[in-house]
Each structure stands twice: as C-alpha cells, then as structure tokens.
Amino acid sequence: MIHVPDLTPMEHPQLIAVGYLAQGEPFSRGPIGELFVDALLDLLLDPWQPSVAAGFHRCEFCRISGGPQRLQYGGRSIPLGASNLYVPHEGKIFVSPSLIAHYVDAHEYAPPEVFQEAVVRCPPMRSIEYLRAILSNGPPGFARRQAR
C-alpha cells in the first residue's frame, strides 16, 4: 500500500487520507476509546464505496503473516485489505483503507482526533443520512460521478 500522511488531501482537497500506513514511515500511537472502535467496526461491516479497486493489501508491519484477512470483534467479522471507508465530516470526506481496523488493534495506531470524532458522529452506513452527508460534504458531483 502506498503511504499517505494522515490528513493529507488526496485527488481532491475535500478527500482527506487517514490510515494509509507503510513500513518505515512514522505514525501516531496511543490509546483510543471503545466508542470509536465500535463505530469504526460498524462502518467497516459493509462500507459504501464510490468505486472499486481490484486488489488486496496485506499489512506491511506483520512480517510473517501479512496480517489477518478478517478482524473478529464483538460478534462482528470485518473483512480487511480490500475496501476503503468514506467518512463525511464538516465539509470533507475522510478516506481510509479497511486495514485501519487492524492497525488500531495490532499496531496501536491512534488516528487523528478529528477522524475519531467523525467516525463516532457518522450516520449509519448506507442510510439516507449517510448518503446526504456524503453528498453535502464531498466534492461537487462526487457520489453521482462515481456511480456511473
């Protein structure tokens, strides 16, 4: 996976990267709250994606196994390494790889506070409120353009 520093704009200034970690690059570590973890895993159960990229990413920090392909927690089974998460928040959309759940769990990654707040406040995935938040916080035509 390519390394992108947290809170860096991606292909558009309103699309902000979080959790694109890579071996040899620094990242923040520290405690995170259970409320954030529960919200993150709920969103990752079946994340909406405006486009699909072929391929699967392994964890670069797990030197032997490459990390798990699923994360089991609280009765949930979260697929890892093949999807991205889009979290709308205050005029932008945070974009994270699904491996963010593994990084938080196994490598003590602490995403930026603003991202943690956005995850906790995010409407339920695939709800009409989520769609409205994506439309109102993303670049003009973002969801519509990607759906074609």
Image (tube, rainbow, N blue to C red):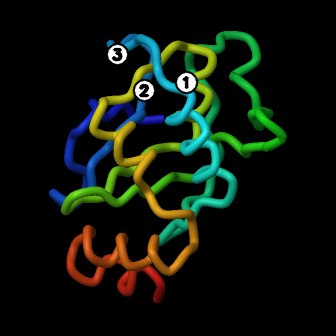
For the residue labelled by badge 2, is the local secondary structure a helix, a strand or a loop? loop
Give the residue pinned by disc 3: 28
Residue 2: percent from left, percent from top: 41, 35
For the residue labelled by badge 3, is the local secondary structure a helix, a strand or a loop? loop
How far separated are the C-alphas under marks 1 and 3? 11 Å
Q: Nearer the viewer, residue 116 or 108?
A: 116
Residue 21 tag number: 2
In this view, the residue farthest toward the right is 75
Residue 88: percent from left, percent from top: 34, 60
Residue 103 tag number: 1
Q: Residue at x 19, y 62 (%)?
A: 91
- Name the image quarter holding residue 30: top left
Q: Counting residues from the N terminus, which is met first, the one under dot 2 or under dot 3?
A: 2
| Circle 2/circle 1 CB separation < 8 Å | yes
- Name the image quarter holding residue 132: bottom left
- Name the image quarter holding residue 39: top right
Q: Residue at x 56, y 64 (%)?
A: 125
How far separated are the C-alphas under marks 2 and 3? 10 Å
- Amino acid carrying label 1: it is Tyr
Tell me the mark number nearer the camera, choosing from 2 and 1.
1
> How many other residues sit within 10 Å of disc 1, few (<14), some (14-19) or many (≥20)?
many
Residue 57: percent from left, percent from top: 61, 38
How far separated are the C-alphas under marks 2 and 1? 8 Å
Q: Counting residues from the N terminus, which is met first, the one under dot 1 or under dot 3?
A: 3
